[in-house]
């Protein structure tokens, strides 16, 4: 019997497998496709690899603004795809090397029985037992029940789009969320005609609206068609029938969210679910003794770095390591790899406002001088206050927006648009995670000239 069986070899599963085996547990890891999960094989890494090629092409075509002449700039999509495959293979091999102490079963597994001290699984016709089970089965692309989508050869999900050997001439993207806008960036920079159809009044509805407005303005001016408040009623062949107009495109890419993968868990009939995902407590324990879950399957925050952190917390709890660790959900950085990039951490202005309205009660707030807005402060500064940003981002203004609490001066949220903010949002994560006050943050020395200085400038 193994100490720990892990279902799924994505960021949650492989992080847990490595940590648990290093701590001396015997670990059995089931992965039905490839180690690395969605992130490494059909998500973060392949998209960022293709986006990098697209950005190089885009920058070369726009090099004249920087005094560089680049004639006859061209690209070879098949080569970009080959490089993407090479990058993924290299990283998958790296993960395999880190898991040498684990037993890896490359097959779909099924839980067949469970008691409080033992879990039984089958895979490839073999039976396995373990003391504890860690469910890290991830999520899959959601196909909404729009008439005409199913079995339509013109329709892609993100996985099919990443695998395509050739670029379409035009693409209509259903859903202006993170995946939709990253693919819009990739295709637009490579010359594909792009239309984005978003049901909500804005694209990227969970992000700060001032940041999104800058992206929207730039993308519309550059020729991406973005329709908001628009519902797709049906699809006929390669035509989207919306509540406003008909949109024809060679490919229809569906990016309307992902759903937890619960296959293979049917025998765990008492497993508590919440909104289609596995319920977990603060240590990633499910309601069943000896069963943990982490990553997208818990439906909490569908990000690879959150999955990895959840796995660390879960393994720490399994091993009863002190001090007990928890996840700082208030300080999770996130990045949207558009061009320019968007990066944020912590609360948005609206979330702070909503929080105070809930806490203080509408009546108390109405009686307060200045209302709820007197409880926090919004600091904004264009990225052009950074010399390095101006040197490297001809024509862009960018924005850094920081929300602080007026009562204790702490930093609650940081929201940015401008390259390369993905690379320094971690400094903002430290500030939010550690509860830095403005005076404390001002004492940090940022290297000059870097775009990261904008964080300090915005709080001056
Ligand atoms: P999402 O929830 O981010 O966005 C889906 C969008 O589709 C929403 O804006 C929604 O309003 C819209 N929508 C839903 N139904 C629609 C319809 N019928 N017509 C038009 N619009 C509709 O989901 P996603 O972009 O598919 O991403 C899935 C998950 O993967 C997210 O949790 C995301 O955070 C994660 N992800 C993260 C990154 C990153 O961190 N860079 C990259 C890719 C994916």
Image (tube, rainbow, N blue to C red):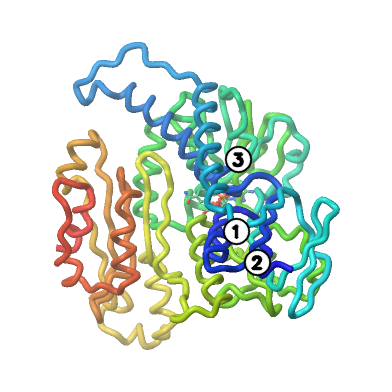
Rendered location of residue 139, percent (x, y): 64, 54
Q: Quadrant of residue 189?
A: top left
Q: Which residue is mark 1?
A: 13
Q: Residue at x 18, y 42 (%)?
A: 388
Q: Quadrant of the N terminus?
A: bottom right
Q: Residue at x 79, y 59 (%)?
A: 110
Image: 353 above or below 192: below
Front residue of 376/231: it is 376
Residue 363 appears left or right of 394:
right
Q: Say what secondary structure mark 3 lies in.
A: helix
Residue 154 in sight in this render: yes
Residue 248 in sight in this render: no
Q: Residues within 10 Å of mark 1 (few under 14, many from 20)?
A: many
Image: 414 above or below 359: above
Labels 2 and 1 touching (C-beta < 8 A): yes
Rendered location of residue 441, percent (x, y): 20, 67
Of tags 3 and 1, the one toward the viewer is 1
Q: Which residue is mark 3?
A: 158
Q: Residue at x 65, y 66 (%)?
A: 134
Q: Residue at x 32, y 87 (%)?
A: 367
Whole-number angstrom distance, CA of label 2 to CA of label 3: 27 Å
Rendered location of residue 342, percent (x, y): 37, 49
Of tags 2 and 3, the one toward the viewer is 2
Q: Say what secondary structure mark 1 lies in.
A: helix
Can you tell me whether the CB of the residue at mark 3 lies under 8 Å from the nearest atom of ligand 1? yes
Residue farthest toward the right in the current orientation of the protein? 125
């Amino acid at each position: 019997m193994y100490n720990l069986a892990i279902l799924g070899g994505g960021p949650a599963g492989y992080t847990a497998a490595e940590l648990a085996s290093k701590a001396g547990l015997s670990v059995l890891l089931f992965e039905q496709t490839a180690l690395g999960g969605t992130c490494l094989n059909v998500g973060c890494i392949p998209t960022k690899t293709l986006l990098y090629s697209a950005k190089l092409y885009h920058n070369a075509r726009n090099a004249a603004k920087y005094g560089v002449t680049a004639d006859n700039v061209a690209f070879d999509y098949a080569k970009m795809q080959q490089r993407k495959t090479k990058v993924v293979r290299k990283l998958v091999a790296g993960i395999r090397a880190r898991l040498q102490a684990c037993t890896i079963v490359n097959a779909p597994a099924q839980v067949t029985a469970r008691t409080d001290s033992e879990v039984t699984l089958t895979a490839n016709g073999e039976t396995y037992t373990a003391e504890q089970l860690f469910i890290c089965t991830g999520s899959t692309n959601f196909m909404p029940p729009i008439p005409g989508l199913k079995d339509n050869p013109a329709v892609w999900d993100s996985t099919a789009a990443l695998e395509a050997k050739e670029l379409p001439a035009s693409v209509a993207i259903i859903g202006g969320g993170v995946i939709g806008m990253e693919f819009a960036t990739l295709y637009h920079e490579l010359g594909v005609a792009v239309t984005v159809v978003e049901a909500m009044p804005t694209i990227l509805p969970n992000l700060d609206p001032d940041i999104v407005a800058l992206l929207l303005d730039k993308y519309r001016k550059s020729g991406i068609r973005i329709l908001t408040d628009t519902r797709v009623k049906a699809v006929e062949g390669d035509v989207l029938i919306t509540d406003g107009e008909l949109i024809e495109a060679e490919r229809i890419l569906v990016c309307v969210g992902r759903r937890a993968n619960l296959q293979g868990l049917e025998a765990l009939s008492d497993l508590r679910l919440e909104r289609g995902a596995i319920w977990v407590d603060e240590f990633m324990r499910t309601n069943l003794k000896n069963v943990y879950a982490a990553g997208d399957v818990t439906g909490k925050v569908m990000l690879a770095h959150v999955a990895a952190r959840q796995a660390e917390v879960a393994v720490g709890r399994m091993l009863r390591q002190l001090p007990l660790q928890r996840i700082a959900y208030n300080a999770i950085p996130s990045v949207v790899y558009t061009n320019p990039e968007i990066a944020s951490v912590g609360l948005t202005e609206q979330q702070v406002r909503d929080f105070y309205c809930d806490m203080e009660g509408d009546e108390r707030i109405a009686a307060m001088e200045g209302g709820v807005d007197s409880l926090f402060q919004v600091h904004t500064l264009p990225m052009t206050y950074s010399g390095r940003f101006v040197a490297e981002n001809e024509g862009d203004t960018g924005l850094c927006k920081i929300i602080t609490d007026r009562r204790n001066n702490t930093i609650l949220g940081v929201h940015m648009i401008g390259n390369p903010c993905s690379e320094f949002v971690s400094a903002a994560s430290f500030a939010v995670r550690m509860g830095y006050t403005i005076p404390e943050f001002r004492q940090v020395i940022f290297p000059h000239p870097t775009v990261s200085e904008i964080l300090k400038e915005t709080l001056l």
